[in-house]
């Protein structure tokens, strides 16, 4: 698959579990993003990795921990989540220095916390 | 930070009619305004965008207008078709930033 891929596509976990979401972009981009998408709400930016700088939304709980080992891979580590964390988690990437700000999204991981 | 409001939250139109979605933004430093379309079960995809030095942009049946003074921008879809049924998100980006602030989305349903 080309573009932005995410695994797994669906995840069900208990509140005591630890899991990780993976995102990979095959577009040569230099920025990657994690978003949370809940019903009837704006896409909520959680974390950005851009040009080796990490920016985070201060409202994101510490039970979410991002990792970006290189410009093509992004992880979201999850631990002791709450039922209200159930949502679609979208990864996106962009090439910031091209003058185009288009973000390319992955298909998302549908997370259910029991 | 930037705050983007989007209206309406749902919109039902008869096939062939036009659809209009409106967004307002709060930060006058914003200079880039994209629109994303998300079909059911699929990822959001950019359909059109506009920069602050332009007042209107068209691409076939879709157009976007920007009023910098009033800080609002709108998406216009003409001659709607069933494949236009989706959730549409507006967004804004400040000139010194690389993050997008999204609206809450508009669910558009085109009735056959």
Image (spheres, grey):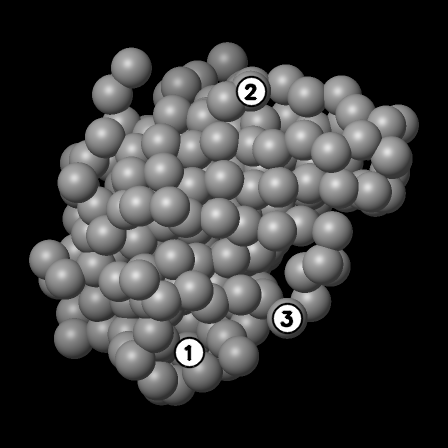
Query: Is residue A12 rendered to the left or right of residue B52?
Result: right
Position of residue B84 measured from the top left corner of the image (x, y, whole percent):
41, 26
Mark seen at residue A58: 3
**Disc 1 element:** loop
Query: Is residue A29 rendered to the left or right of residue A18?
Result: left
| Mark 1 surroundings within 10 Å by alpha-carbon count, few (fewer than 14), some (14 through 19), many (20 or more) | some
Q: Give the image quarter of residue A36.
A: top right
Label 1 is found on which chain of the structure? B
Mark seen at residue A63: none
**Disc 2 element:** loop
Label 2 is found on which chain of the structure? A
Label 3 is found on which chain of the structure? A
Q: Residue at x 86, y 28 (%)?
A: A14
| Mark 3 surroundings within 10 Å by alpha-carbon count, few (fewer than 14), some (14 through 19), many (20 or more) | few
Is there any visible trace of residue A12 in the rendered image? yes
**Disc 3 element:** loop
Query: Is residue B11 rendered to the left or right of residue A67?
Result: right
Q: CA distance from mark 3 to mark 2?
A: 26 Å
Mark seen at residue B71: 1
Are tags 1 and 2 found on a single chain?
no
Look at mark 2 in the image and give the residue it sits on: A8
Q: Residue furthest left?
A: A98
Are tags 1 and 3 found on a single chain?
no
| Mark 2 surroundings within 10 Å by alpha-carbon count, few (fewer than 14), some (14 through 19), many (20 or more) | some
Q: Residue furthest front?
A: A69
* Number of the front mark, 1 or 2: 2
Image quarter in which the N terminus of chain A is found: top left
* Number of the front mark, 1 or 3: 3
């Amino acid at each position: 698959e080309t573009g932005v891929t995410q695994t797994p596509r669906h995840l069900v976990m208990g509140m005591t579990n630890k899991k990780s979401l993976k995102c990979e972009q095959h577009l040569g981009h230099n920025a990657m993003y994690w978003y949370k998408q809940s019903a009837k709400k704006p896409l909520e930016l959680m974390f950005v990795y851009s040009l080796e700088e990490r920016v985070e939304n201060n409202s994101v709980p510490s039970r979410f921990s991002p990792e970006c080992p290189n410009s093509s891979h992004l992880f979201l580590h999850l631990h002791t989540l709450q039922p209200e964390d159930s949502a679609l988690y979208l990864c996106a990437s962009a090439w910031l220095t091209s003058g185009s700000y288009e973000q390319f999204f992955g298909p998302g991981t549908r997370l259910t916390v029991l | 930070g930037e705050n983007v409001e989007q209206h309406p939250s749902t919109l039902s139109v008869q096939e062939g009619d036009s659809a209009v979605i409106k967004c307002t933004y709060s930060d006058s430093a914003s200079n880039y305004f994209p629109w994303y379309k998300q079909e059911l079960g699929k990822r959001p995809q950019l359909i059109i965008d506009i920069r602050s030095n332009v007042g209107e942009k068209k691409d076939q049946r879709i157009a976007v207008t920007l009023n910098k003074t009033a800080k609002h921008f709108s998406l216009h879809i003409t001659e709607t078709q069933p494949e236009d049924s989706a959730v549409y998100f507006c967004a804004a980006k400040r000139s010194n930033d690389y993050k997008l602030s999204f609206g809450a989305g508009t669910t558009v349903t085109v009735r056959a």
